[in-house]
Amino acid sequence: MQKSGDKMKKKITIILILLIAILSGFFFCNSNQKKAIIKPKITIKEENKKEKEQINYQQIIIELQKKYNNNDIVALVKIPELLEEEIVQTKDNDYYLHYDKYKNKNIIGATFLDYRNNLELSNKLLIYAHSDPEGTLPFVKLTSYNNEDFYKEHKYIYLIDSKKERKYEVFASYIETEDFDYVNLTNFNGLTYEEHLNKLKNKSLIKTDVKLDKDSKILILQTCSFNKDINTKDKYQLVMAKEIKNNEE
């Protein structure tokens, strides 16, 4: 009888051990599933979006204003691997032709936004800067956009202001010598805004697939041209780009 009782105890012990093992496995699995639900995997795209949302653009501009002791600094223009320049804006388009971003009198001036522009409201933003025959100033590099291969490697321009970063895609590059209506913001000599934009695009020395319409917001970078093949006093290198939204990328 004792042996029979011992066998029964062993059987019960084994059954209990098995039940504990099964239940432990179930709770472990269930716990992992809950963790997976609570902490879903974040994709690279979501991480990048989160990073952008955390950028304090206002602080970037404030720090630049402090660095140069100049509250006229309103933005930063960047072309990857080409240039990065602070943008100033004042009440006219003359002052920063003769003063630098420290507000010191300087023949090289500064890179400035047209005084008529409003970063939030203007459909066409105009940015100007000096150039030089020696090729030492940043905007001299814009002449390279007249080359198709160079354009393909540098399609995008970024503009950062106190509220956000805008991304633009280049749609035209050329040297202008006589038709300066590209600086017009509202009156386009009888053309609609869309017709005006396509007129500018058709002057380009490079071909692009960028589509322009009545809602297009554009950025124009202007500097002097020192092209020796063009025997005209007033000649300007222009690079034009259209703002693109996330769903257009």
Image: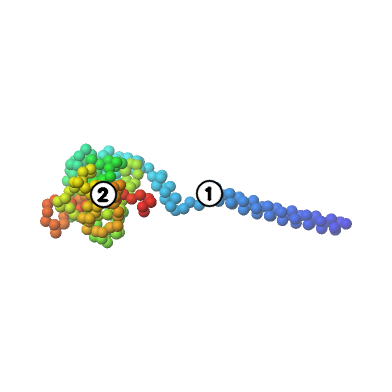
- The residue to which callout 2 is attached is 194
Residue neighbourhood size for the residue with mark 1, other residues' Cα within 10 Å, grouped as few (<14), some (14–19), many (≥20): few
Residue at x 38% of width, y 51% of height? 247
Residue 165 lies, in percent from the top left, at: 34, 46
- The residue to which callout 1 is attached is 39
Residue at x 43% of width, y 47% of height? 50
Residue 186 visible to the viewer: yes
**Disc 1, SS:** loop
Q: Which of marks 2 and 1 is nearer the N terminus?
A: 1
Residue at x 12% of width, y 54% of height? 232
Q: How far apart are marks 2 and 1 (CA)?
A: 48 Å
Residue neighbourhood size for the residue with mark 2, other residues' Cα within 10 Å, grouped as few (<14), some (14–19), many (≥20): some
Q: Looking at the image, is mark 2 or mark 1 nearer the viewer? A: 2
Q: Which amino acid does label 1 sit on?
A: Lys
Determine the image quadrant of residue 185. Answer: top left
Residue 151 numbered tag: none
Colouring method of the image: rainbow
Q: Kindly indicate whether the residue at mark 1 contacts the one at mark 2 (C-beta within 8 angstroms).
A: no
